[in-house]
Amino acid sequence: MFYISSRGSSANTWLAKVLSKHPRIICFRSTRSFPPYETHEEECTSDKFIKGLLECEKATYGEKIFGSIHGYHGIEAKHDCESNGGFFGYTTRHPISRIHSAFIYYMDVYFQRKGIKVANKDIHDYVCSEIQLNRDLSEYLTRTRRNLIPDPRVGWGMQAKPIITRLIPETIKKGIRPILRNKRNIQYALLAKEMYNIYKNKHHVSVESKLGDYTAWLFSKLAGVFLRLDRELYDNCSLAQSIKMEEMTQSTEYFKSRVAMQIAPSLEWSDEYLRNVISGEWNSESEVTHVNYYKVAISKKRFNVHRSAPISPQEIWKTWPEGMRRIIMRYFDTYNIGEICNSFDYDITYL
């Protein structure tokens, strides 16, 4: 049994697909329920989830190894996984690239739901030049530090109070104000679930919300949560438990040593399988997908790819407006991300 933690935008869909391509492995993705429903309505604890994976292995008389990726964030599932004899790992990616990718993904969802026509490949330039250029985002730094919700399990559970009161319609605000006055974690979780419902378009989002405020809030929250979890994983796991997206998707030797042999060292990982993982040369019935950020060969559909020509972390940094860069640097300093980047050989000399 295994569990791989990730906050997203790190080829999680690709990894789950290629692992499940192995005849002895089943890898679920992005679920916190058992059976693995995609929605969060049937959430269970990480302990129950891990035990569910073990029951699946027992039900197949040990013929299949079960695991999952990208559901419980940070180290939430680490103890339950390791105490039951499983391998716990986590994916990494250059922090600038990951935040950039996640920001574009969520902005694309927002634009589609609001009926704003901006092509995915143009979101980065649109937000940087039209929305955030020359804006002072210092207020979002203080709001983020003060109002970060400490429960990463709840979808969109990272909302800031001052922005919430502008996004939620008046009729909904009246019912949530008691929660806003009380800072206990359980009430923050309830508030986060309410915001998750609004995000999923179950409620009408107030027309008073401003695109500039939303993009600043989203960027600040993604930076804060992603980098905090990077720190949490780095401090509580060994480097041997880390899986670099950049290496995982382009090196058969790395995939074998860092992914395959840790997840299931007793299984056979044939050269043909490993070659297909990187090259995408699956048979015609295959539907394997590949996130092609680093120009790795792909097969058929690609997930969360923002442009045909990849943009490097340094290029991303240069094109972010000053306000967005200040947000990144605040969290780099808060969580000492430079130490993490040095450990993984991520170049940040241009910051």
Image (tube, rainbow, N blue to C red):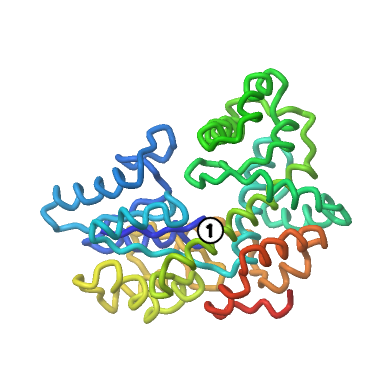
Q: Secondary structure at mark 1?
A: helix
Instruction: Say whether residue 65 is left or right of residue 141.
Output: left
Query: Residue at coordinates 55% horizontally, 31% vertically from top-left?
Result: 187
- Name the residue: 48% across, 72% down: 244
Q: As displayed, is residue 171 above or below residue 147?
A: above
Q: To which residue does mark 1 refer?
A: 229
Q: Residues within 10 Å of mark 1 (few under 14, many from 20)?
A: some
Q: Quadrant of residue 231?
A: bottom right
Toward which corner of the image does residue 251 lie, by quadrant? bottom left
Left or right of 101: which side holds 78? left
Nearest the eye: 202 or 323 = 323
In the image, 19 versus 32, the foreground residue is: 32
Residue 228: x percent and y percent? 57, 58
Residue displayed at 44% across by 53% down: 70
| Quadrant of residue 283 within the rendered picture | bottom left
Image height check: is 83 above or below 49?
below
Three-letter amino acid code at the position of disc 1: Leu
Residue nearest the viewer, comparing 303 with 40:
40
The residue drawn where x is 28% and y is 74% is 261
Q: Is residue 67 left or right of residue 190?
A: left
**Residue pushed farthest right?**
134
